[in-house]
Image: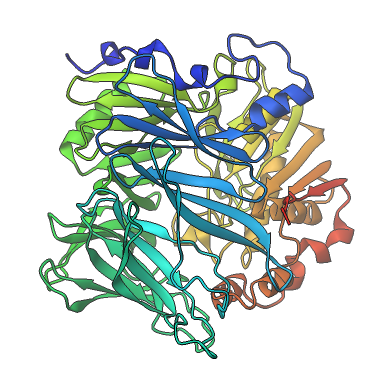
């Protein structure tokens, strides 16, 4: 059977997961006028599928789905049985424990992470994660204990561990990154004395754990080859005595048949200089990573044979390379990702390139396609596809039968509802610079003299891209035009665009945000009496600061969880290992006073709505 539209074959039992899991709201096939409460619920509700994972043999699908305000349930669906229904095997209430992710550690064994926001001894709140394993039927649920889990720990035990390698060659076994915390040894001979990051081989069935790489305080990173072997380690050569990270990482590697560490090079996270490794290909015996070329991140491979031979894979003159596309449980690198107006993939694997092209033809209205998981042999692929007017759908592709089944919609409640198209545009800043942005107008409107919102992104080391945005679509549904600028200080456009960053170069970044509002007015798109600026995190900071520097431009300000004082932001990280990095990123000087909205509040004329989410703590 040839690739194409005809390949979109039968659904699993002709029923999607979304349908058989139950729907609480009326969905799709209607575009009746929504009330404010209905719109807030339909657009703001969490995605139906928060995470999905395919078993090694491709027979079972595990999904995490929301329940209530904070809860979640994990279900398992047997893909081999027609008309089968997913079975709930675990759940969390969200007060405070929340299901974070679940993946298959073995053919019928799952490894999951839960996290919670809990009060720490110093009065702060901390994100704490823990791991547990269970069978596909929900039985034999067991906690993955932290090494030295006594009560005499000298530091907080926040990090429960993460998986570096899901495919070691033994069913149910993973390579796990773990942070060892020493314990007080007064009067005890069994106290845990290891300190820092290390790697353990963990059997999620027997719970047996053996050390692979010793824990050291200076360790920052380990990279596996996807076959159960650690090939690269990174450590901080300038770690202070009190544990403050410098932001510099020195990378070393092991040859294919060697146990000795060899030098790979240094990477400086503050400047982005040096080779930053991401993955290892054991077949080609190379490391894939990013490195600056003419002020932008480019993709390279470096041989791990003692020669450190470097090969350029992809560089662009307009944007940074984002990273690497992987597939399957071995995290095999198959492509390089970058973002122009939307996310793109430069495939390194010829077969996946062919499949990607065929999928683009088969799903012409869903150009954003991501491979999310696969069976061990990569013959069954779990993928997600979406667009600006489609929140996305999950598909299962069988490469042997060339059949593809739609499993579920990411947001069931929006299926069949008309959404607004997102247009990539450029507007001119005050100094003449062309600023890339995304303009969304209400569907069916002429987009003239409408209420409008300038919505800067968070970060500031981030950027917006073309696709579905639930927050923007909510406002557009209420009749607003939304403009999302990738102001100077945004990530992804190279060093010259990033400048010193959105805090130290706040005048340029905030000037671009304000100019976005001015452009909407000058083009006749926005009603100048109904122009709003709104953002989340750094976007909230940008909204407040833009209203301070252009007090007569915006008529209202909405700041969600914003940064309001740069000096206080630095102080909040004192006592944490990344304090030096954060301190240097924010910097010192006049911008601390001039660039802090809390210190410029008297200049803001517009009414301000500022709020922050709260946490429900179970005591």
Residue 195 image-quadrant placement: bottom left
Is 283 left or right of 264, judged from the image as shown?
A: left
Residue 223 sits in quarter: bottom left
Quarter of the image with the C terminus is bottom right
Q: Nearer the viewer, residue 451 or 404?
A: 404
Residue shown at the point (12%, 66%) measured from the top left: 256
Task: Out of 228 and 192, give the one closest to the viewer.
Answer: 192
Q: Can residue 448 be seen at all in this image of the molecule?
A: no
Q: Nearer the viewer, residue 617 or 470?
A: 617
Counting from the top left corner in percent of width and height, residue 585 is at: 57, 71
Image point (72%, 75%), residue name: 590
Give the answer, above or below, for where 345 lies relative to 391. below
Q: Position of residue 164 (x, y in %)?
A: 33, 58
**Left or right side of 341 for 235:** left
Q: Relative to 397, is 603 above or below? A: below
- Looking at the image, residue 183 sits to the left or right of residue 126; the answer is left
Residue 375, percent from left and from top:
26, 36
Residue occupying image coordinates x 46% and y 66%: 146
Task: Say if residue 134 shows up in the picture.
Answer: yes
């Amino acid at each position: 059977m040839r690739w194409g539209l005809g390949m979109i074959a039968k659904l699993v039992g002709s029923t999607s997961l979304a349908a058989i899991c139950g729907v609480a709201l009326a969905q799709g096939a209607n575009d009746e006028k929504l009330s404010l409460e209905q719109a807030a619920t339909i657009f703001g509700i969490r995605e139906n599928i928060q995470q999905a994972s395919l078993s090694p043999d491709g027979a079972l699908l595990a999904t995490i789905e929301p329940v209530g305000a904070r809860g979640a349930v994990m279900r398992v669906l047997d893909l081999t049985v027609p008309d089968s229904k997913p079975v709930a095997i675990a759940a969390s209430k969200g007060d405070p424990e929340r299901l974070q992710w679940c993946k298959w550690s073995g053919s019928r064994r799952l490894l999951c992470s839960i996290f919670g926001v809990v009060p720490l001894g110093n009065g702060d709140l901390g994100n704490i994660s823990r791991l547990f394993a269970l069978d596909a039927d929900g039985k034999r649920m067991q906690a993955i204990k932290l090494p030295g889990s006594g009560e005499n720990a000298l530091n907080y035990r926040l990090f429960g561990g993460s998986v570096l390698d899901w495919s070691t060659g033994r069913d149910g076994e993973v390579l796990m990154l773990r942070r060892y915390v020493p314990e007080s040894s007064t009067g005890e001979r069994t106290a845990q004395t290891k300190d820092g990051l290390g790697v353990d081989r963990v059997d999620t069935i027997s719970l047996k754990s053996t050390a692979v790489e010793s824990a050291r305080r200076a360790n920052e990173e380990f990279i596996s080859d996807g076959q159960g072997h650690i090939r690269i380690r990174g450590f901080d050569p300038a770690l202070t005595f009190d544990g403050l990270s410098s932001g510099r990482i020195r990378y070393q590697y092991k040859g294919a048949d060697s146990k000795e560490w060899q030098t790979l090079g240094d990477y400086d996270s503050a400047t982005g200089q040096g080779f930053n490794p991401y993955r290892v290909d054991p077949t080609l015996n190379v490391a894939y990573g990013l490195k600056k070329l003419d002020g932008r991140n480019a993709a390279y491979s470096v041989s791990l044979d003692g020669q450190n031979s470097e090969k350029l894979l992809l560089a662009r003159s307009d944007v940074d390379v984002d990273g690497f596309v992987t597939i399957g449980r071995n995290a095999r690198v198959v492509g390089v990702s970058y973002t122009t107006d939307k996310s793109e993939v430069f495939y390194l694997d010829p077969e996946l390139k062919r499949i990607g092209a065929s999928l683009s033809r088969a799903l012409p209205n869903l150009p954003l396609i991501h491979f999310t998981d696969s069976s061990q042999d990569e013959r069954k692929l779990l993928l997600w596809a979406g667009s600006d007017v489609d929140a996305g759908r999950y598909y299962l592709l069988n490469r042997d039968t060339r059949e593809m089944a739609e499993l579920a919609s990411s947001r069931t409640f929006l299926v069949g509802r008309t959404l607004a198209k997102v247009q990539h545009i450029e507007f001119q800043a005050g100094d003449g610079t062309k600023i890339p942005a995304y303009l969304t107008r209400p569907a069916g409107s002429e987009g003239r003299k409408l209420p409008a919102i300038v919505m800067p992104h968070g970060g500031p080391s981030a950027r917006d891209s073309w696709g579905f945005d639930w927050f923007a679509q909510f406002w557009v549904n209420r009749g607003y035009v939304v403009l999302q600028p990738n102001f100077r200080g945004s990530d992804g456009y190279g060093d010259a665009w990033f400048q010193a960053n959105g805090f130290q170069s706040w005048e340029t970044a905030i000037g671009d945000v304000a100019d976005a509002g001015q452009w909407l007015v000058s083009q006749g798109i926005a009603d100048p009496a109904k122009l709003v600026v709104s953002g989340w995190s750094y976007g909230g900071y940008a909204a407040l600061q833009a209203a301070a520097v252009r007090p007569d431009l915006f008529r209202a300000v909405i700041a969600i969880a914003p940064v309001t004082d740069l000096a206080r932001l630095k102080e909040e990280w004192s006592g944490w290992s990344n304090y030096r990095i954060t301190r240097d990123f924010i910097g010192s000087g006049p911008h601390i006073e001039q660039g802090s909205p809390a210190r410029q509040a008297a200049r803001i004329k517009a009414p301000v709505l500022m709020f922050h989410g709260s946490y429900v703590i179970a005591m």
